Amino acid sequence: MRRALLLVALLVAQPALADSSLPPAQWANRQLPDPRQEAKAEALMEELRCLVCQGQSIADSDAELAGDMRHLVRTRIAAGESPTAIRSWLIERYGNWISFRPPAKPIGWPLWGAPVALLLLGLLLVRKRIRLRRG
Amino acid sequence: MSRWLRLTPVVLLGLLLAALVWRLAHPEDTTIRSRLAGQPVPAFALPAALPGQMGLASADLKGRPRLVNLFASWCVPCIAEAPVLQQLQRRGVVIDGIAIRDRPEDLAAFLAAHGNPFERIGADNASRVQLALGSAGVPESFVVDGRGIIRHQHVGPIEPGDMPTILAELEKAR
């Protein structure tokens, strides 16, 4: 009895409606006919953040909005727009956050400088130790 | 080696732990906001989402301040927002809709069930205008002033408690 009820429940169950019922946009999951343009689009899509699954690129994400963003990228590349222009169009709207390739800004310099500084510090320590041992 | 120098790593570890605990207690705001606030609405022209009714173009967003609401029939929080939008409309707010990835029949059923506070509804089937506005989901709303400048963005459903803010932003946009 319980099993039958469960079966009925499974048959009647509806998926949570978090997605629309429209099919994916034309260029969401289709490659551009020109391989050179497709390569450009793909390289850009790898470096754009999905607005829904924020840790994924739009090339990796299955979210509908990511599909629409791929459609946007491919349509614009096919229309002859440069990847740089498309990237800055998106940055204008969502900030640098949308791009996985952040611009080098003064606030990031310590981050780039840290490995060099730590290496120098390490060398200094090693030199000191060697001197101590000799002494 | 001096005693203080020996304690340095412990102090550094303490600082690191303090920073981590602070971040856990005050998580980062992950709301995605449009950077277009204060700028003109990007030019667009959307076809009507329902047959025989008016579509929505950026040129329509002129004259008096308007609330542009991005919504969808498949969006559950939009159902919760619907009565609040109707209340706003009753208070004289002009509301235009942008239906994201929707079918006319689904949309008509949604509006029949939850009310239709919209003057115009444009169909944005590939989220093109949504992306142009810097929006990241549904529902979201923009207060646009009489000159077509975006004055305020509300991310997520407008709840009863948000009404004063929205009304104040519309008043400011006058």
Image (cartoon, helix red, strand yellow):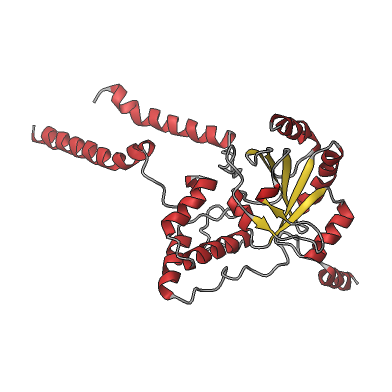
**Residue occupying the far left of the picture:** A135
Q: Position of residue B19 (x, y in %)?
A: 48, 32
Q: Quadrant of residue A66?
A: bottom right
Give the left or right position of residue B89, taking residue A41 as reference.
Answer: right
Residue at the spot 71% in from the left edge and 61% down from the top edge: B47
**Residue occupying the far right of the picture:** A1
Q: Quadrant of the N terminus of chain A?
A: bottom right
Residue A12 vertical position relative to residue B81 in the rendered view, above or below: below
Q: Position of residue B85 (x, y in %)?
A: 81, 43
Q: Quadrant of residue A124?
A: top left
Q: Quadrant of the C terminus of chain A?
A: top left
Residue A26 vertical position relative to residue B127 in the rendered view, above or below: below
Give the left or right position of residue A98, taking residue B143 as reference.
Answer: left
Asked if residue A99 shows in the view, the reply is: no
Asked if residue B129 shows in the view, the reply is: yes
Q: Position of residue A91 (x, y in %)?
A: 49, 48
Residue at the spot 73% in from the left edge and 38% down from the top edge: B64
Give the left or right position of residue A127, taking residue B81 as reference.
Answer: left
Q: Nearer the viewer, residue B53 or B99?
A: B53
Q: Nearer the viewer, residue A82 or A94?
A: A82
